[in-house]
Every structure is written in structure tokens, then in C-alpha cells.
């Protein structure tokens, strides 16, 4: 039987963060590292100028507490929304297979002129998503209660 964790158990609240500069983005990138999502959970809404992903995010911020309490590590569903998106490009993603599971390695920003730039989502397996934005504004919001990571393991990059 799978058991849901509860934010109340750890005295925590769901994350809701906004990245408006490089420093903010480095924190957000660390929190979404190893988040996984099916290709079907990517949405670009050109009229709203928003690109959003529904992620199964590994709760990096909870690993110490899990270890201290001897409980399994957790994931949580989160929305990663990039605002002011003017154009979306991708490589290494089979968009005809909506069930393909993708994994985020990092999120970075390459500045352009006058506050514009490109938000770069690097994916495992040489995939990437490039979002041309008018300004850097990314929101990460947990939308479910945490749940025990199905693997019961912390992601490992062989370091």
C-alpha cells in the first residue's frame, strides 16, 4: 500500500517560488533537478505567452529530514510555469510520443538584449527545451501533497 506523506508531518508548506534573476533561478533549478514528466504534460499557451510543465519533482529540500526520521524520500507534483514566452524550440524530444518520460537536469537563463533572453531546460538524454522570453519570470508551485518516491531512492548522478 502506498502512503502519502503530509506537509503537516514535517511542519512545512508547499513550495511556491518565483525566479526573476539568475540567483533565484539557480535555487529553482536545484529544486527541479531530476523532476520527471511525460511529454503529454508540456503546454505552450501562445496567447497567454506561458509555457508550463506538470512535474513529479523530487523533494531535495526534504532529504535530510527523511534521513533523520528514517523514512523514505518523497516526490511531489509541481507546476513549473515560464511567463512572457515568445517562442519555443526543442531538440531530442519525440513530440509524437506523449508518453515519453522526460527528466530535467537543469534550468538556465541566457540573457539577450534589454532583459530578453532564453530559458534553457536541459533534459536527460541530450534533450533540451529553449524558451525565448521577453523577461525572466518562472514560477514553481507544488500542487499536491508529497508522496513516497516509487523508487524509494535519492536520484544519483554517479558523482
Image (spheres, rainbow, N blue to C red):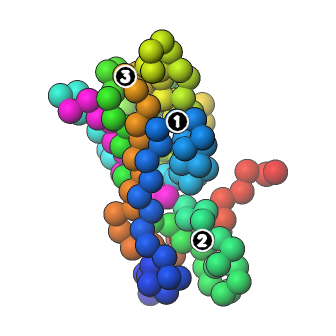
Q: Determine which of the numbered discs, if any, sits on residue 107 in the image.
A: none
- Name which residue lies at 79% across and 51% down: 158
53 displayed left or right of 29: left
Q: Note whether 85 is above or below 145 in the view shown.
A: above
Secondary structure beneath label 3: loop
Q: Nearer the viewer, mark 2 or mark 1?
A: 1
Q: CA distance from mark 2 to mark 3?
A: 34 Å
21 displayed left or right of 67: left
Residue that carries the numbered disc 3 in the rendered image = 134
- Give the residues drawn in magenta, as a range: 48-57
**Closer to the N terminus: mark 2 or mark 1?**
1
- Name which residue lies at 42% across and 68% down: 14
Tags 3 and 1 touching, CB below 8 Å: no
Q: Say whether residue 52 is magenta.
A: yes
Q: CA distance from mark 2 to mark 1?
A: 25 Å
The single residue placed furthest to the top in the displayed view is 113
The single residue placed furthest to the front in the displayed view is 114
Q: Say whether residue 46 is magenta.
A: no
In terms of depth relative to the viewer, which is nearer, 98 or 67?
67
Q: Are there few (<14), some (14-19), or many (20+) residues within 10 Å of tag 1?
A: few
Q: CA distance from mark 3 to mark 1?
A: 13 Å
- Name which residue lies at 33% across and 46% down: 41
How far from the left and from the top, in percent, is residue 24?
55, 44
Residue that carries the numbered disc 1 in the rendered image = 21
**Closer to the N terminus: mark 3 or mark 1?**
1
**Closer to the N terminus: mark 2 or mark 3?**
2
Amino acid at each position: 500500500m502506498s502512503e502519502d506523506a503530509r506537509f503537516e508531518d514535517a511542519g512545512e508548506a508547499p513550495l511556491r517560488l518565483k525566479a526573476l534573476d539568475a540567483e533565484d533561478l539557480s535555487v529553482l533549478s536545484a529544486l527541479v533537478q531530476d523532476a520527471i514528466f511525460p511529454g503529454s504534460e508540456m503546454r505552450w499557451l501562445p496567447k497567454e505567452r506561458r509555457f508550463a510543465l506538470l512535474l513529479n519533482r523530487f523533494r531535495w529540500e526534504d532529504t535530510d529530514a527523511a534521513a533523520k526520521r528514517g523514512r523514505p524520500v518523497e516526490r511531489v507534483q509541481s507546476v513549473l510555469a515560464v511567463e512572457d514566452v515568445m517562442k519555443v524550440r526543442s531538440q531530442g524530444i519525440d513530440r509524437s510520443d506523449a508518453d515519453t518520460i522526460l527528466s530535467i537536469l537543469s534550468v538556465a537563463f541566457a540573457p539577450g538584449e534589454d532583459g530578453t533572453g532564453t530559458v534553457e531546460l536541459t533534459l536527460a538524454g541530450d534533450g533540451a527545451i529553449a524558451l525565448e522570453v521577453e523577461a525572466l519570470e518562472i514560477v514553481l508551485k507544488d500542487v499536491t501533497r508529497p508522496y513516497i518516491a516509487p523508487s524509494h531512492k535519492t536520484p544519483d548522478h554517479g558523482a
